[in-house]
Amino acid sequence: MYATAPAVAPPAYEGILRRQSARESAARTYARALPIVPVRARGMTIEGADGRRYLDCLSGAGTLALGHNHPVVLEAIRGVLDSGAPLHVLDLATPVKDAFTTELFRTLPPALADRARIQFCGPAGTDAVEAALKLVRTATGREGLLSFTGAYHGMTAGALEASGGARDVRVTRLPYPQDYRCPFGVGGPRGAELAARWTENLLDDTKSGVPAPAAMILEPVQGEGGVLPAPDAWLRRMRRITADRGIPLIADEVQTGVGRTGAFWAVEHSGIVPDVLVLSKAIGGSLPLAVVIYRDDLDVWPPGAHAGTFRGNQLAMAAGAATLTYVRENRLAERAAELGARMLAGLRSLAAHHPCIGDVRGRGLMLGVELVDPNRGQTRSVAAELAGQLGGEHDAAVHGRPSAGPDRPSHAAPVSASAAPSRVSAAPVSASAPPLSATAAPNSASAPPISASAPPVSGSAASASASAASTSAMHQAGPDDPALYGLPHNRPHPPAPELAAAVQRACLRRGLIVELGGRHSSVVRLLPPLTITDEQADAVLDRLADALAAAERSHHRDTDGRHTRSPS
């Protein structure tokens, strides 16, 4: 008779995960996709309770500019704790607060710093957005707001109004330029120009139904929207449009700030100076802190117009001042630009071997890989697509951009996933791409001019000739031919959120933590700390390449199985 083996107790971390699932809200997010229990962390590395180590490309959604537990941050926190200074002082002046404000102002664009005021808010970026909206509505006496499709500004009521999924009638949605899924189907400088003209027309048309707004709010790079860097020329155009019409411009730099995009503040790439700057995440050095910086002539709200119990977080201010100083003195923004460009090149070389990669984009160390289903084409007709653009830019932004065209080179011809290289290095390339021309005109959609030597044609004859030519072209090409509308033939494949989730899981099994974002959660996002080393960057790309190949194979097997089982 065999002896019964003693029962083995499950690891303690499994109980922690079970209790989290049983006790915490159904609204929890990251914990669902990342079922780990971190117990130690340093720099870019997290160690779980199971003893496994992970490279963290989430970085607290961009909060950890210096990674986990950086020595200068820990020293600053210990300095406050050991000094006996108060930890909670509401909005009273303290040496710690003064040092933080001085360092923050030192990093600002000079044209803003010279006239800046600061409001300390509650602990999260969404509260700073609320304060900014309250500020401009008080200063202008107006209520309306201009925001952009795909935007994300936070989870409180006012911030949600300005975000892409909201339906509040006080907020007017404007098209945000992007290449891969351009709302106008063209991308590049032409798409950005069309987006700017749309905005100008909406504001200047007395019958547009859009009253003079209190402000325009935008992200220099849309993060949750799918890692979409705004063209520099378009940002300058938005600054000009708002300035000419007396509309305050709010730049939301909650995630893009403190060197993340290759400049200390992302607005510096374009050279614009916003009227209001919303900051959080990295400015607290890993601890909760949020502020609004704004031009002094907007400072007309009364005492107590905006407040927050935890706006005097001394530990966060100390950690934040240390982080800002370290990033500035060690030129980590320039490092982010250089290494980010190399990683972007590595990701694009990976795209050549995986047809499921629809687009690779980003700026600095804010990178995104959009995954698509290459076996499914775009099902909407061009006519329906154009109607969608007229009816709502958000829908068009999801369905409209060609994967290649005159303004965007196509990816290299795809090959099978099995032919992918086993190692993708962050190949050195130029750290900066040529900026869009601020004066670049869109490609002309009109017919070529009639030759001067051609005989004149009467108006009626010309009309009849044009009608006949149009009818002939329609019969030859069909009513859905994109060429009839001046659009390229090739359009992007549908997003693949299930594949993206599979890639995220495969990354975790290989010791890599990544985030998903974008309209359909089909964009794999990389937000490593600014202190990431060259070796870690190569490891991130290697693990992502391996995870992508594995997820792609599994996804194909599952898809083939479903097709086999489905009735004919």
Image (spheres, rainbow, N blue to C red):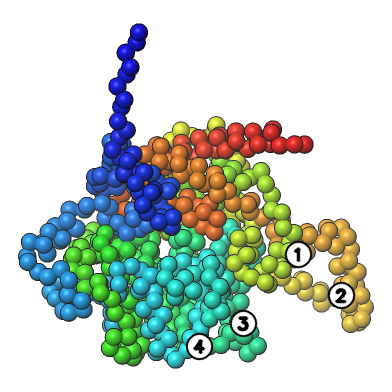
Q: Quadrant of residue 451?
A: bottom right
Q: Amino acid at mark 4?
A: Arg
Nearer-the-camera pick, 101 or 106: 101
Residue 383: give its label.
Answer: 1
Residue 201: give its label.
Answer: 3
Q: Position of residue 531 (x, y in %)?
A: 28, 52
- Rounded to the nearest angstrom, the CA distance separating label 3 from label 2 is 37 Å
Give the secondary structure at mark 4.
Answer: loop
Q: Are marks 4 and 3 in contact (CB under 8 Å)?
A: no
In this rendering, position of residue 205 left or right of residue 476: left
Residue extending furthest toward the front:
1
Mark 3 or mark 1: which is in front? 1
Mark 1 or mark 2: which is in front? 1
**In the rendered image, which residue does mark 2 sit on?**
454
Give the secondary structure at mark 2.
Answer: loop
Crowding around mark 4 (Cα neighbors within 10 Å: few <14, some 14 to 19, many 20+) is few
| Earlier residue among tags 3 and 2 | 3
